[in-house]
Image: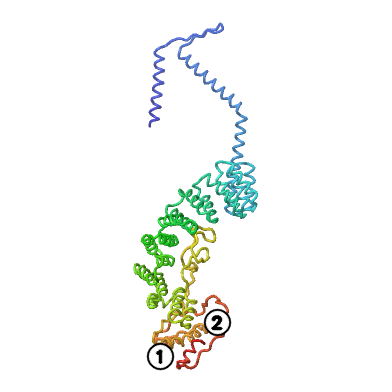
Amino acid sequence: MIRVVLFLLSVAVIAAGFVWVADRPGDVAITWMGYRIETSLMVAAFAVAALVLALMLAWSVVRGILRSPEQVSLFFRHRRAMKGYLAITRGLIAIGAGDLRIARKSADEAARLSPGDPLALLLTAQSAQMEGDRGTAERAFRAMTERDDTKLLGLRGLYIEAQRRGDAHAARMVAEQAAKAQPSLAWAGQAVLDDHCTAADWAGALSALDHMKSGLEKADYRRKRAVLLTARALALADIERDASRSAVLEAVKLAPDLVPAAALAGRRLAETGEQRKAGKILIAAWKINPHPDIAEAYANLRFGDTARIRLARMQTLADKFPGQREGAIAVARAALDAREFGVARAGLAPYLLAPTRRVATLMAEIEEAEHGDEGRVREWMGRAMRASGDPAWTADGVVSDSWLPVSPNGRLDGYEWKLPLAEIGVSRPAIEFAPPDATNEARVADLKTQVASEFVTRPEPERPARKSAKLAAKLAGKPGAKTKPVDAVIPLVHAPDDPGLDSGLDRDPVPEPSTPPPRDAWQRIMQLFR
């Protein structure tokens, strides 16, 4: 609409100009070289306009003739560029499709038609990588690093090639160069961080993490910084205890659920007499993630405390969050140290029907410390061998006795507290019986050998249901009573790993006795050592 109005206004102005000139007629006379030309003003104006147009047309023709070589050259360059672009397109599509022949042919054509083009260099490098020609790929990536627009891409390619040939030094140098060129580059920052972590240079790793801060989420940054601070605190534990304490306290603030940080902070604060602050940190961490290391640090808040005081402290911690297996195990361990065997047994009682390896081993220790009953100890150790596993520090399929900041594959914060085989889905029900009655302990000891031989040495699937019911009745002190068969005792062949030649599991099967077990007291005692 505006353009229409402007056009109409322009026409009106021009028309008004013509009218104004027409209303004021005049003559124009030109005398030149003996010639005299006389005409009206309007004709002279048209003549001047025609002369200007003619001159402009003549200049355009002359300029076109003068510029024709350049235009022809530009035409051929444009056509060459289009052919190079089409070659690059075909090559990239061929790389995506895995067609090495077309990719290599297109790369050569693109390099010939468009030398120095960024996409042509990329096509050459990728086709060389696909072919296995690392020398050509590296030359292409180095050519990219000489251009401002492809420098980071070239550095990325050189880093990958250095990793492929196992040159850690070259990979580190390239990554540092890329990180300096653009600090927010994720892969470069991560590569520098991983290199510092592999070398246990925690100060350098913290500096590298700070350079990556803008490219990380806040939670991820806080977690990684807490892990690095904990690793640094552990490294300084025996060198600079003050620096170690400062680092681990900052780590606890960043990640209160990080078990190693909380346990180390509790120990460091306990050393300086800040038991109240240490207790708060440990209780907060225990609430989020109950762990044996936290329990141990909490039990030893004050140096020189007696075993009974440590037991009371652990009972207080377990009562704050009831129903936790780790709390029960921690109380049982403290009670064993205090020789409060009743408290230890009571704490583990809810978990004896399906004990884990730690629970069964702890029960064996209790039996040995309280009664010195080798038969009971062997029984519980046997159950520990068949019991399900306990959580452990696991990373990349490797189990560690203690937490480590870096996994075997070089991954920061890779270790997790979990069942080592949980991700594989390996879970088998342990073959257990209800705990025997206390008044029939001697008879239970006699029958355990018979039960073990029946369920271990004779694993036919059709036997256990009926005979286990009779044995359960005997264990309960009611021979002949009818009881329900043991549920889901399948399969009965998941033997533990080979325990060695001295375990006794390589002996011949003991035949099932056809007569009832002996009733004589001396014979019952001798039966324990058979």
Residue projecting furthest to the front: 304
Residue 23 pos. (x, y %): 39, 13
Q: Amino acid at mark 2?
A: Gly
Q: Can residue 302 be seen by looking at this rendering?
A: yes
Quadrant in which the N terminus is drawn: top left
Q: Secondary structure beneath disc 1?
A: loop
Residue 109, by quadrant, is: top right
Q: Number of numbered discs present? A: 2
Residue 392 pos. (x, y %): 48, 67
Q: Residue at x 56, y 6 (%)?
A: 34
Specify few, some or many for label 1: CA neighbours under 10 Å numbering under 14, 14-19, or 20 or more. few
Q: Is residue 252 left or right of residue 60?
A: left
Q: Is residue 253 left or right of residue 528?
A: left
Q: How is the image coloured?
A: rainbow
Residue 330 pos. (x, y %): 41, 70
Residue 236 pos. (x, y %): 49, 57
Q: Secondary structure beneath disc 2?
A: loop
Q: Amino acid at mark 1?
A: Pro
Residue at numbered disc 1? 479
Disc on the earlier residue, 2 or 1 = 1
Which residue is at the front of the view, 352 or 310? 310
Which residue is at the front of the view, 105 or 413? 413
Residue 251, by quadrant, is: bottom left
Which residue is at the front of the view, 360 or 370? 370
Residue at numbered disc 2? 504
Query: What numbered label is drawn on residue 268?
Result: none
Which residue is at the front of the view, 20 or 521? 521
Specify few, some or many for label 2: CA neighbours under 10 Å numbering under 14, 14-19, or 20 or more. few
Residue projecting furthest to the top: 34
Q: Mark 2 touching mark 1, by CB under 8 A?
A: no
Instruction: State whether residue 270 is above or below residue 503.
Output: above
